[in-house]
Amino acid sequence: MVEITRRNMLMAAGTAAAAFSLGLPARGEERKSVRIGYIVSKTGVNAPGAGTTSIPNYELWAADVKAAGGLAMPDGSRLPLEIIAYDDRSQTEEVVRGIERLARHDKVDFILPPWGTGFNLAIAPLMDRFGYPQLIGTSFVPHRIDAISKWKRTFWFLGTADDYMGAFTKVISTAGKGVTNNKAAIISVADGFGIELVEEARKKLEAAGVEIVMDKSYPIGTQDFSALLNEASGSGADIFMALSYPPDTFAITKQARLTGYNPKVFYTGVGTSFPIYSDINEGQVEGVMSLGGIDNSRPEMQAYVERHEKLIGAPPDYWASSLIYTSLQILEQAIARRGLDRDAVTEEIATGSFETIVGAVKLTGNRMSDLWLLGQWQHGTFVGIAPSERQGARTPLLPKPAWA
């Protein structure tokens, strides 16, 4: 992988801008590489999420392509990757400027998405305008706007907030029947992710007869949750949900442990499925629930985890990581079939079938739908527990055991 600075790329762009018009080399000029660009949060509040889920998989995919001799083209040849990477510093205006820079100045062939719901929605109009397919592995399909009709080049790999809250409510209403007092306390980050989830949680839980006795939001970047946790504890609810981002998830769990707050259902958001979540909580995470899960019984998944650990020095997270790598495999196979014409590649992604680490994938309506929607820490591993009919689904552990 080659990381190229903006200065170097601007110099290169000055002499070779025409070479990348429409993703093709200039007449008579032989293409020597494929340029892949991305801008993600290397610093700032989103860095833990991007540094665990997005960046390692971008680096692993580039390493795997290099080990294969380059990116396969339809004529059987292979081209090496040039990676152009920027830091958005967890700021929306930076990620928007970065996409403009990658498209207008760096003239990359394809752009990999940023991390998080808000950033992916912020760049969707630009990606569509510049003609890039946007393979989104860290955001739900938004329910407030018809994103797929509005931006036909967007492809969504995480499902919807409705899917996740429906799976959680079903487990609470079945495996949790008679275990809890059917009262819930919810806190949520005041960001697109938290807003999407809490709206669906309210609808699903109330329809199932669960009384929501506390429902509070907090600003992104909050680190002291003691007041909110004290209020949740005092509410008498047996079900606690934190629809949170990684730094919040880590802080909430740590503060709950320290104060001995241990409701019968403890559900936290992004970051719960990260391997480091167990490490920073000294392994005292048995029974904690969250979004996602994986089925590690597939040899392809086992090989992926092994390569990830070898290159990155840590295993992937148990939710979005494998889906991001899956999206990159789909992009790679679409390019092998259709070349570097972005319109043709976009059409192939929308209509083709692909072999990936999670199995055969064919998107329906630009969405991946066969997903783990609810996971739980059990015996040191974050496993999938819903949908219960999926192969490899484990039985939910309720009530949650004590922290110690």
Image (spheres, grey):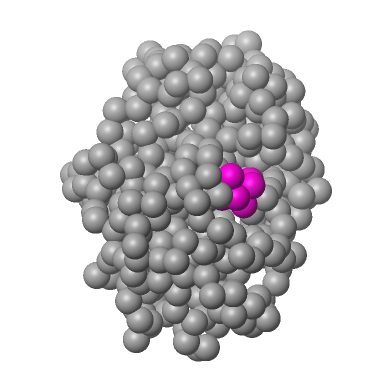
Q: Where is residue 312 in the image (x, y as percent from the top left)?
A: 40, 61
- Nearer-the-camera pick, 376 or 367: 376
Q: Where is residue 317 in the image (x, y as percent from the top left)?
A: 40, 57
Which quarter of the figure is the C terminus placed in? Answer: bottom left
Q: Position of residue 225 (x, y in %)?
A: 64, 77
- Nearer-the-camera pick, 207 or 229: 207
- Nearer-the-camera pick, 227 or 21: 227
Going by the image, does 218 lie left or right of 393?
right
Q: Position of residue 117 (x, y in %)?
A: 63, 46
Decide if residue 234 is in sight here.
yes
Magenta-drawn stretch, dominant element (helix, strand or loop): helix
Vertical comparison of 210 with 126: above or below: below
Vertical comparison of 23 with 158: above or below: above
Decide if residue 251 is in sight here.
no
Vertical comparison of 304 with 78: above or below: below
Going 36% across and 34% down the picture, which residue do you hit?
Answer: 370
- Nearer-the-camera pick, 112 or 393: 393
Going 58% across and 19% down the picture, which residue do you hit?
Answer: 342
Asked where in the image residue 150 lies, by quadrant, the reply is: top right
Q: Is residue 211 magenta?
A: no
Asked where in the image residue 45 lies, by quadrant, the reply is: bottom right
In magenta, the rendered stretch is 196-204
Going 44% across and 36% down the picture, which residue do you hit?
Answer: 328
Callout count:
0
Vertical comparison of 184 with 200: above or below: below
Going 30% across and 38% down the picture, which residue do you hit?
Answer: 358
Going by the image, does 170 lie left or right of 188?
left
Going by the image, does 350 lie left or right of 4?
left
